[in-house]
Every structure is written in structure tokens, then in C-alpha cells.
Amino acid sequence: MNRISHHKHNKDTFYYATSRLFERASYYGLRTLIILYMTGEILKMDKEEALFIYGWFILAFTLFQIIGALLGDLVIGNRKTIIIGGVLQTIGSFILCFPSAIGLYVGLALVVLGSGFYSPNMVSNFGKLHLNKTKLLDSGFTLLYLAVNLGSFLGILLIGYLVEKFGYSIGFVTAGLLMLVAIVPIIISNKEVSYMTSNSKSFLNKRILIISLAFLFVGLFWGIYQITGFRNSDLQFYFREMPIAYMSDNIWSSLNTIVIIPIGIITVVVWTYFYSSQFFKLMIGFISGAISFGIIYLIPEIPTEKHVTLYCWSFFFLGIAEIHIAPIMHSILTKYSNPKYLSILVSLIFLPTGLISLFFSWFNEQFYDHPIYALKFGVIAMLVLSGILIAIVLWNNKKIFNRGLGN
């Protein structure tokens, strides 16, 4: 690792992280209400119809990110698109307060449109803040990822509590107010940064290769994460039934966030002062993922109370893996893509993940019936990918060493 000198995060980094925290609190807090609201006493929808609408809500959010990215990169600029998206999402949350089918559809449409405008342009503009200090990209995006996790955790707790005490209208109003607060740091931050791009053909080829590899590795990580979830769900079912005094239902449902937050804080601090290559971090992430799945594999099919500690250790290593993979994807995109089209690339991150998950879904029935097989596959796949990343890191270090000798 190399020490980072002469570069520090500026106030705009924290403005954007604060904005993202409040936006995710609004979005995830609202998202937890939708099915309950549709099937409740007000709208009285069938569960199948509610799930159908919810499915379209999630799909539309993914698709509208592409539209928002095109608008931000090619038409009006990222910062303006962020603010417009925030306003639309705020209005949509308020409209959901009207207890009718029309209020539901119009409100959800505006939330989807607003969130689709906000998210890719937020990530893009945040990355551009670091184009003149790329060694802080990993630390910066980890801070942003930490804000996402903390925001979603607090939003779900806050809005869930308010709905339970005061009803759905207060929950939707709170989501709107949180989104309104999220716009403020963007408005008071500096204007969009300027940037320069390289026209070198060799550099272009290198960028395409690095971005393609990053897409592939991150897509494979989330695909493997998805299929190993069958075994994870089984274990949580068993553990929730056990009378474990220090593990309430709230802790079980929030275990991933509880682990991610301290790991993320430590990682942000370390990566603010020390730098290592992004593929080295991906390597650490996949090795940690392999350890996590390996620990789960050691837990017997029917666990006992003594296996809870082992299960928590698996979450610890999975948290390390997630921190070393998820934010690093955005860091690599920012560093190696053309900044003019960064939002568009960010909006397309779901494609490799979605395609790989779709491929794995063909085996869902077998994995669901035999979750141990899925877990075994996950461990082997993570070890293979770790080996490939170790080879990439060693090859890159050798190139740097030979270049140094040549000088």
C-alpha cells in the first residue's frame, strides 16, 4: 500500500454523501410500505395484484435510471437532473398520501421517475468530484456506499415506526420530507466539475478491458451471492426460532447493515490515507467471500445455538467482501470511463448482474431443493475467481516493477 499525500476529501464529498443518505432513507422507507399499503384497509388489493405492481415498480426504477442518465449526460447536466429527480420524488411521496388508486399510481410513477433521474447522476457527479485525485476514489465511493446502507437502515426504522404509530399518510409525508432534505446539500454544493479525456487508442483499449473485467467480476459476485442466499435463508429460519436472548428479530433482519457500517467506517479512514489498486481490493473481496461461504458450509444442515457465532463470522467476512467489491465498481467506472458518459455507464451496471442472475435462475429449482449444492458451487466459484484476480494483481505488479527497472 502507498501513502496518499496532498489529497483530502473536500466538503462537496460530504454534501453528496449526506444527500445520498437522506435519499436512500426516503426511498427504502417508502418501499417497505408499498405492499402493506396496497393490501391494507384503504386500497384492499389482492396480494397477487400488489406484488405485480411492486414488481413493475422495481423494474421501472431500473429502466428509468437509463433515461435519467441520458438526460443528465447528454441534455441538461448531471447536477440539474439530480435536483429535478429529487423534486419529482418528493412530489410523488406527497401524492401517495391521497388514499386512492389514482394517488397510488401517480405517486409511484413520480417516485420511480425521480429516483431514476437522481441515482445515476448522483453517482456520476460524485465520481467527477474526484477526477483530479483518483487515489481517493475508493475511499469516496465507500463513504457513499456507507451512506446508502445507513440511510436505508434508518429510513426503514423511522418510517416503519411512524406508520405504526400514526398511519400511512405520516409515513409518506416523512419520506417526502427526507427527500426534500436530500436536495439541499446538492443545491449548496459547488457546480459540476470540468474534466479532460484521453484520445489515445491504446489507453482506450485498456479502459474498455478494465471496465469489462470489472463488470464481469461484480456481476458474478452478486450472482453467486443470490444463489447462496437459499442456504442463508434456511439458517436464518432455524436461528430465528431459537430463544437467543441477544438476537431479536430486528437484529436478524438488520445483521448485514450492522456488520457493514463499522467495516465501512474503518475502510473509509484507511483508504483516505493509504492506496492500493482496485483489482487488489477486488481480490481481497473475493477471498473474503470465499471464506464467508466456506464458514456457512461448515454449519450442519440443522444448526444448533452454538453455530450462531460461526454464522455471525460468515456475515463479518461477507461484509468485508461487499465493501471491497460494490463501491469499487463505481470507482473503476469513474477512473477508466469517459466522464462525459459516466452516468450512462452507471445506469447499465444492472445489465451484467441481471444477465448472470438470469443464467443462475435456470438452476433455482435445484438450488432451492438442495441449498448445500448452491453453497458448494459458490465456494468453488469464489475460489476460482480469487485465483484469477491474484494472477491479475501479480501480473500488474510485475509490469510496474519492470517499468521501474527500465527507468
Image (tube, rainbow, N blue to C red):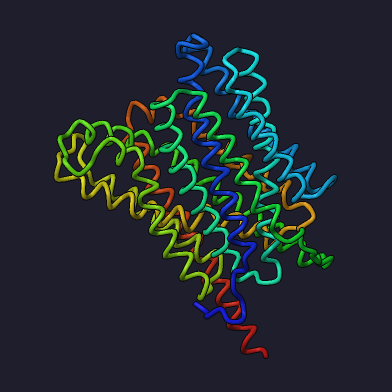
Residue 321 position within the rendered picture, expressed as x and y whole percent measured from the top left: 43, 55
Residue 288, position in %: x, y? 39, 57
> Quadrant location of residue 154?
top left
Q: Nearer the viewer, residue 51 or 314?
A: 51
Residue 220 picture location, percent across and down:
52, 46
Q: Nearer the viewer, residue 119 or 22?
A: 22
Q: Is residue 194 above or below residue 21?
A: below
- Residue 190 falls left or right of residue 367: right
Q: Is residue 379 above or below residue 64?
A: below
Q: Is residue 334 above or below residue 83?
A: below
146 lies left or right of 400 = left
Residue 334 vs residue 264, the one in the foreground:
264
**Taking 70 as reference, is 46 left or right?**
left
Q: How many marks?
A: 0
Residue at 38% from the left image edge and 39% from the top image edge: 228
State which quarter of the image contains the C terminus.
Answer: bottom right
Picture quarter containing residue 330? bottom right
Q: Residue 29: x and y, percent?
A: 49, 35
Q: Residue at x 59, y 23 (%)?
A: 96
